[in-house]
């Protein structure tokens, strides 16, 4: 049987997607939730201070950029990140990780049950 290469555009549930601008999405591939402590250990092991934040359903962040690389894990709920310079949207669910290179313009809309995330900046 021939092996078919995974294309994240054709297979949006693939574990790792690299989008234009080197934006990366790593999907949590397990049925069990990713423990929040595991996320904290991930950042602690890299000496990266991190913060936890939450927003209510439908909350929005207008398009903006950061002067640093941002790594974000969705802990609960969902959020859609829009990447206006690429025309792509990325929906994150619990356990999913988004890596935004410095200077990447993005906006976000919180899902219908709200969202909780943990994120860290890399300067």
Image (spheres, rainbow, N blue to C red):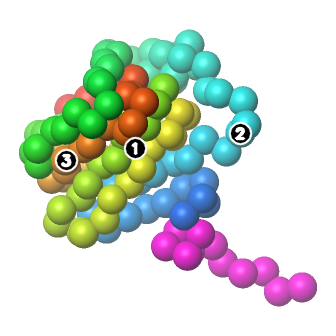
Q: Is residue 109 above or below residue 19?
A: above
Q: Residue at x 49, y 60 (%)?
A: 17
The kind of secondary structure element at disc 1 is: strand
Q: Residue furthest right?
A: 1
Is residue 49 highlighted in magenta? no
From the viewer's perspective, is the residue at label 1 or at label 2 nearer?
2
Tell whether 120 sits left or right of 102. Answer: right
Tell whether 119 sits left or right of 26. Answer: left
Between the residue at mark 3 and the residue at mark 1, the CA separation in whole angstroms equals 13 Å
Q: Is residue 77 above or below residue 98?
A: above
The kind of secondary structure element at disc 3 is: strand
Q: Residue at x 38, y 54 (%)?
A: 90
Residue under pointer 2:
30
Q: Are marks 1 and 2 in contact (CB under 8 Å)?
A: no
Magenta-colored segment: predominant secondary structure: loop
Q: Quarter-wise, where is residue 31 in the image? A: top right
Quarter occupied by the N terminus: bottom right
Q: Residue at x 59, y 69 (%)?
A: 11
Residue under pointer 3:
107
Q: How crowded is the residue under tag 1: few (<14 C-alpha within 10 Å), some, or many (20+)?
A: many
Q: Are marks 3 and 2 in contact (CB under 8 Å)?
A: no
Q: How crowded is the residue under tag 2: few (<14 C-alpha within 10 Å), some, or many (20+)?
A: few
Q: Are marks 3 and 1 in contact (CB under 8 Å)?
A: no
The kind of secondary structure element at disc 2 is: loop
* Highlighted magenta segment, given as a residue range: 1-11
Q: How far from the left and from the top, in percent, is residue 76?
A: 48, 26
Residue under pointer 1:
98
Q: Is residue 120 in view?
A: no
The tag earlier along the polypeptide, 3 or 2, is 2
Q: Is residue 80 above or below residue 33?
A: below
Quarter occupied by the C terminus: top left
Q: Quarter-wise, where is residue 86 in the image? A: bottom left
């Amino acid at each position: 049987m021939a092996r078919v290469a995974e294309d994240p555009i054709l297979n949006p549930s693939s574990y790792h997607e690299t989008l234009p601008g080197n934006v990366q999405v790593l999907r949590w591939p397990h049925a069990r939730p990713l423990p929040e402590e595991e996320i904290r250990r991930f950042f602690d092991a890299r000496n990266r201070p991190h913060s936890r934040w939450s927003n209510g359903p439908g909350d929005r962040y207008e398009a903006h950029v950061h002067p640093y690389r941002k790594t974000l894990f969705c802990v609960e709920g969902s959020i859609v990140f829009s990447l206006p310079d690429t025309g792509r949207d990325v929906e994150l669910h619990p356990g999913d990780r988004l890596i935004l290179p410095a200077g990447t313009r993005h906006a976000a809309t919180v899902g219908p049950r709200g969202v909780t995330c943990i994120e860290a900046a890399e300067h």
